[in-house]
Amino acid sequence: MIRIPMRVLVALGLFVFFPAPPSTRADLLVVEPFDNRVVRYSDAGNYLGNFTSALPSSGFPFSYQLGGIALSPQGDVLIASQVTHQVLKFDGMTGASKGIFSSYFAPGGPGGMTFGPDGDLYVVGAIPGLSTLTAGVMRFDGMTGAFKGMFASSPAFDEAFFVDDAFGLAFGPGGDLFVSMYDRVLRFDGATGAVKDDFASNLLYAAGLTIGPGGDLFVAESRVEFGLVSRFDGASGEPEGTFATMDGIRISQGTFLPSFPSGLAFGPGGDLFVADRNTSRILRFDGVTGASEGVFATQEVDHPTYLLFIPSAVSAVPEPSSLALVATGAGAIGLLLRRRAVR
């Protein structure tokens, strides 16, 4: 029989009670506006079911019912409902409803949204009740959801607001706000909301955008038969070429589905994930080279738009082996204390 020295058992016990930080795990949330749901996938691409069952429905399955999605600094998930013109709040781990975060939107909104460096929520929307449409980026208190005013506006918002495409919003490393708008990316002063310039122009069906780990801007575009992700210098807007491309799918001899990339998100491992709305796929690309790493998920994917990574619930569950070590370590420490008491 192998006998384990007491000091080893005690060391194991201390290791369990003071563990190393857990490895980074994340789940991917995918917005499916036509099905009125947000689905969840593990970091391995496994389908984990609906994130929540508390989304109000319009009753029309082919209507555009959901806008953007964002993760609050407190760990809650906010989802834009275009059925009720509200931003709804959900527990970031369980998906349980936490009620209405904000409801100050005109019909047609809210759209894309993101949290700013100041902790407030910025949402593409329009102020309700006005005789003329005033669309732009609206600002809400990040804790209470109270409306703090129209932060940024441009005639381009009013021209395109009711078109059912994703508006990408992202704050750059310098604090400016970037908004994708079909043929361009607008840049606004992150402190005042003043329009700075057309940061990127001559785009085609620009949808989602995101800031990469190195500070560059990545924008999803669509051509006639294929989609692409363009890359721009995050400070100057200088084009850095096509970062990644994605082909459509030929279903039959006479049926071809062109690629229409929408939402973009960098995963915790640095890879770029793309929601291909028209082909109902989540694609994965090397975050440095742009090389394709294949299809991340297709199961239960239906015309996806926005993507969001959230902490994985799996990482919070102890492994069975860890529980065994806890029991062993605790027993060893208890035995050692009893022996010392006898002496």
Image (spheres, rainbow, N blue to C red):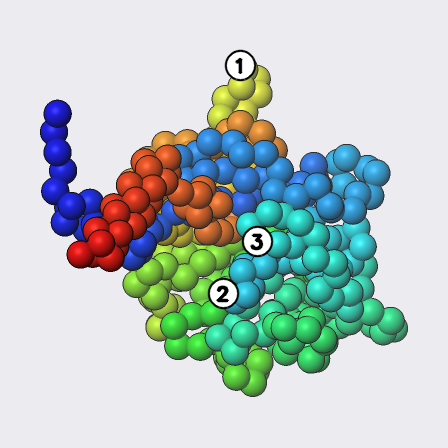
Q: Residue furthest top?
A: 253
Nearer-the-camera pick, 137 or 341: 341
> Tag 3: residue type?
Gly
What residue do we see at 85% from left, 73% from top? 130
Q: In this view, does 175 lie to the left or right of 136?
A: left
Q: In which quarter of the image is residue 31?
A: top right
Amino acid carrying label 2: it is Ala
Q: Where in the figure is residue 219, as x and y percent of width and height? A: 45, 55
Q: Do the residues labelled 2 and 3 touch (CB within 8 Å)?
A: no
Task: Name the residue that disc number 3 marks.
Answer: 92
| 299 vs 63: above or below | above
Crowding at dot 2, Cα within 10 Å, few <14 / some 14-19 / many 20+, comes out as: many
Residue 103 at x, y percent in the picture: 78, 65
Identified at 33% across, 60% down, the residue is 213
Label 1, on which residue? 253
Specify whether 57 is left or right of 121.
Answer: right
Tell me the quadrant of the picture where the N terminus can be found.
Answer: top left
Q: Is mark 3 on a helix, strand or loop?
A: loop
Which of the marked residues, 1 or 2, is nearer the chain's N terminus?
2
